[in-house]
Image: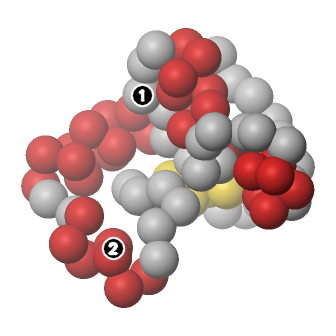
Amino acid sequence: LAVVTGPIDKHACHAAGFRHPGQTEFFEALWQAPAVMTLAGPRLRVGLVTNHLPLRDVPGALDPALVERKLVLFARTL
């Protein structure tokens, strides 16, 4: 299953009652399954290990098990 989304105004969404930090987390909750945020262009596909974190928090959020789960999911996505 794949969903293509565009940018959203997160501030406006939160003000309207949207309870998720971003669209990826919304779909994870809807599907009750993990998702991988993927950025795609004509020649490059990028799968993100973390979602919607301040850059300073990324190193502490990374661990080998998370990286492996996201890599497997990204490979299936491709």
Q: Nearer the viewer, residue 61 or 74?
A: 61
Residue 56 in percent (x, y) is at 36, 85
N-terminal of the pair, mark 2 or mark 1, is 1
Amino acid at dot 2? Val
Among all residues in the image, which is located at the extreme bottom?
56
- Compared with 27, 53 (above or below) is below
- From the viewer's perspective, is 56 left or right of 42? left
For the point 34% across and 43% down, the residue is 70
- From the viewer's perspective, is 30 left or right of 17? left
For the point 59% across and 51% down, the residue is 21
The mark found on residue 60 in the picture is none
Q: Which residue is mark 2?
A: 58
Q: CA distance from mark 2 to mark 1?
A: 18 Å
Q: Nearer the viewer, residue 18 or 34?
A: 18
Amino acid at dot 1? Pro
- From the viewer's perspective, is 70 left or right of 62? right
Q: Nearer the viewer, residue 9 or 41?
A: 9
- Counting the numbered discs, the total is 2
Residue 43 in percent (x, y) is at 73, 62
Mark 2: secondary structure: helix
Name the image quarter holding the N terminus: top right
Q: Which residue is mark 1?
A: 34
Mark 1: secondary structure: loop
Residue 41 occupies quadrant: bottom right
